[in-house]
Image: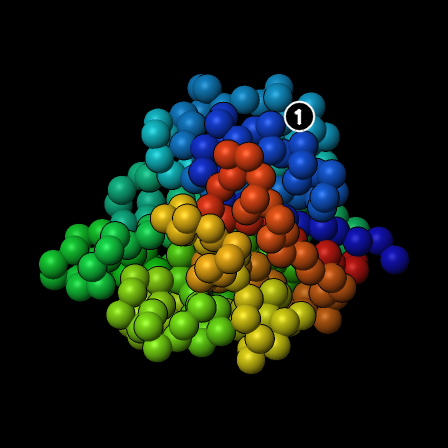
Amino acid sequence: MPSLRIATWNINSVRLRRPLLAELVKALDPDILCLQETKCPDELFPLDDLRAFGFPHIAHKGMKGYNGVAVLSRRPLQVLDGDPDWCGKGDCRHLAVAVDAPGGPVELHDFYVPAGGDTPDREANPKFAHKLDFVAEATAWSAARGAKARSVLVGDLNIAPLEHDVWSHRQMLGVVSHTPVEVEALTGWQHSAGWHDALRHFVPADQKLYTWWSYRAKDWEAADRGRRLDHVWVSPDLAGALARHVVLKPARGWAQASDHVPCMVELAL
């Protein structure tokens, strides 16, 4: 049966870490790779280098120094217009494409949600307010669109919603990324159009699952104080097509690694 392998990775600078894409392709062999935090304005995006990794079809939306999203694909794609200007900031946090796939196009959304700073207080921390406002807008957008068929949403959503998406639920309740208000917001977004949590489709909710380990840890692997900040959601009609997943934990140990690791799901279409 034909399949479609979709990977997502917060690369934390596409120009700095583009050599690591060779390792990613070797390990995952994705048909589509969605990147976040590319930190690269469009005019400097390394198109030729990335095409050399086997992705002739590339869409990107970037700015200097921070944010930025991109979709690299082995299959033809079309950029979908009508993207909202999230929170009126024009800060390159969402890219939508239609990808040629077995059985018809798949609508793919690549998101990079604001991290939210360190203080989980809307009044005291404008970054946290921005994060909550962004997720609220994304929820309203998703609800208005409804459960569109053959749709996938991926990205660094910067929220670990479940108890076992963090190393210590009790100790993380007051830490940005796992606070109750963020969890409620992300859960509302997921439920707004019936999105199915593709990674948790394979890993039960009572098992630990992380995609991010802080740079601050002297030995990230020994401490293993991770969080699941990266997500793959599929529309309800694709839930039954989920065939396999990979969370590439060894990537956190690569030279000049991102603090996030790539995640991939394979759909049997």
Q: Is the residue 230 above or below the residue 180 in the image? A: above
Q: Identify the residue shown where x is 20% and y is 59%.
A: 119
Q: Identify the residue shown where x is 54% and y is 71%.
A: 208
Q: Is the residue 154 above or below the residue 189 in the image? A: above
**Residue 37 visible, this orientation:** yes
Q: Quadrant of the C terminus?
A: bottom right
Q: Is residue 14 left or right of residue 186?
A: right
Q: Is the residue 33 above or below the residue 223 in the image? A: above
Instruction: Identify the residue at the far left of this view.
Output: 124
Q: Is residue 166 left or right of residue 97?
A: left
Q: Disc 1 residue type?
A: Arg
Q: Which residue is mark 1?
A: 51
**To which quarter of the image does residue 242 belong?**
bottom right
Q: Is residue 170 left or right of residue 198?
A: left
**Residue 62 visible, this orientation:** no
Q: Where is residue 30 shown, x and y percent of the image?
A: 71, 44
Q: Where is residue 189 shown, x and y percent of the image?
A: 42, 67
